[in-house]
Amino acid sequence: MSGETAGKDAWVQIHAVLLSPEQRSGKVPNNTRAVPLEMWVHGFLLNDSARVGDEVEVETAIGRVVRGKLCNCSPAYTHTYGRTLPELAELGRHFSVLKNTLQ
Amino acid sequence: MSSSVESYEAVMARKGEIIRNAVGIDYSRFESGSIAFDYEGMMDSTGYGFEEVRSIQQRYGVGNTPLLELRNITALARRHAAPGKGARIFLKDEAANPSGSFKARRAATSVHHARELGFTGVIAATSGNYGAAVASQAAMHGLDCIVVQECYDSRGIGQPEIVEKARKCEAFGAEVLQLTVGPELFFVFLRLLEETGFFNASLYTPFGVSGIETLGVELHDQMRALTGSAPDAVVVTNAGGGNLTGTARGLLQAGARDTEIIAASVDLSGLNMADDAHFNRKSFTTGHTGFGIPFTTFPDRSDVPRSAARPLRYMDRYVTVRQGEVFYMTEALARLEGLERGPAGNTSLAAAFSIAREMDSSQTIVVQETEYTGAGKHVQPQLAFARENGIEVRFGDPREEVPGTSIVLPQDPSMIAAQDLDLEDLKRRYIKHAVAFAHERLDHAAPASASGAPGTRGVLSFTEADIEFLAAETRSNPDAVERMLREE
């Protein structure tokens, strides 16, 4: 399967709009009320095959069936330790000098 | 989730019934009909005494975490303190719990209770460490788990710290629903409770909060063993108030009546937690004033009718620290003490470093938690993310930091200075909320009836029990409460 399509039982990510801007609570700030309430969840694809953007059903990690649009056929955890900040390197040098003076 | 659309209002109208079914507690039993409710009665209603809670936790690997003395950080604090000042700083290494934070204590009794009641699964609404704690305990008990988290802004950009917590929950086998910003998370949560019939492993039930009492007792016993006496002060990172409430109750049970209980939150003043545009302008997703102050002044805003987390009852002092100060101290903990831990858990460390310098060198102060660290949930990615989102990151005087605009790493450790919040002001705000909440409930119980002209408010009269309750809630006396009520 390419990155754009997935077959039955593939572990995928889906997306759904749960509340449109008009359906949202009256108690949220304007910036939030201007946009929908969206949801993402991972699961096993129940459709025989689907393309990104198709309305599909998945079975989640606990076996619940959830509907949404297929948004990722090969989801991955992409969070990292981030780029090195010069300020943090500098802070490291500050502590390495300091540590020799404390005992 | 079914595709049939039910309105936000329709689901919210059923919240009382949904929550009652999902926590197995009839909260009306503890209500007096006016402001007062029987807090201790509710706390006792779990049916689990302290020893039973402790034995459940031991069975599932929770608690008995190490207490460590931070000798190098103490030496650094003394270098920047007046002669004879600089309390010994200790730290309770709660990252050693199975899920990497003290939240395992909170989850242990809840999940155990859910299984005892015959629930097949548990749900928690949290973007924090609590999700991982519930997921971990559910895995141990063979229960299903769903975690609902507020994770992304409307551009689909996730807070790295929250994305990491989603990964951790999934690692324990949980289903994680990731939502965009907004308080309607509660609506999604209610629909899930109805659909699945799972237990609401709320952070705010007596099960959750009583689970933290063991932390207070352990901390006390370990300090006695190490130093010969109870600690002079304990600093607790404060968000929803449960951490402080449970720890303080445990310390009191252990007999530590003179220990000063200090709350600490990261100063995020000016940022609105429900605002899509502010969501990714903060570098702390919990332990901050955006939760700490609202929950301290109105604990019953939580996801249960009456919160078991009532921090003003136990708080002697409430301070704020800045994001840059917490990041600095997180680096100090790694570089000077050899302990690499997550930034949010070090909020109380930054506060303790400042407060220790005011205290005598013969005194002791305990930082009451740490949390795990990893990709996304670490100084480096959190600061890199801030910079990518247009936040200025620089060295300087932390007092120049503006939440949502800049993060200022202290040029020098002497600049780390916890700022006191006005506790009397918080108490007045608490009273104001309590009165408004009672009015709301009165109006709900008897909407404009024949007894009153249309639009008139039900009359709220304060009983002696109400005054006593408010005095206990605010750690003040009946006279002070009457005065605050008159000012209302």
Image: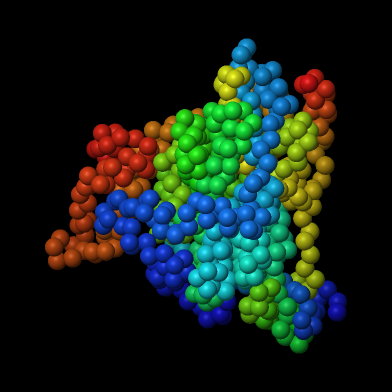
Q: State the residue in front, B120 or B398.
A: B120
Q: State the residue in front, B153 or A88.
A: A88
The answer to which quarter of the image holds residue A86 is top right
Relative to residue B40, is residue B479 depicted above or below?
A: above
Q: Position of residue B159 (x, y in %)?
A: 67, 53
Q: Is residue A26 visible?
A: yes
Q: Is residue B193 visible?
A: no
Q: Position of residue B225 (x, y in %)?
A: 62, 33
The answer to which quarter of the image holds residue B349 is top right
Relative to residue B68, is residue A35 depicted above or below?
A: below
Locate residue B159 relative to residue B38 in the image: left or right: right
Seen from this angle, which residue lies furthest top? B83
Relative to residue A96, is residue B64 depicted above or below?
A: below
- Residue in view at x 42 percent, y 68 percent: B20
Q: Position of residue B464 (x, y in %)?
A: 22, 44
Seen from this angle, which residue lies furthest right? A2
Q: Quadrant of the N terminus of chain B?
A: bottom right
Q: Position of residue B257 (x, y in %)?
A: 45, 33
- Residue in view at x 33 percent, y 58 percent: B30
Tell me, what colour scheme is on the image? rainbow
Seen from this angle, which residue lies furthest bottom? A48
Q: Quadrant of the C terminus of chain B?
A: top left
Locate residue B136 relative to residue B355 in the image: left or right: right
Q: State the residue in front, B209 or B296.
A: B209
- Residue in view at x 59 percent, y 47 percent: B286
Q: State the residue in front, B252 or B418.
A: B252
Relative to residue B273, is residue B326 depicted above or below?
A: above
Q: How many labels sit on residues?
A: 0
- Residue in view at x 58 percent, y 38 percent: B221
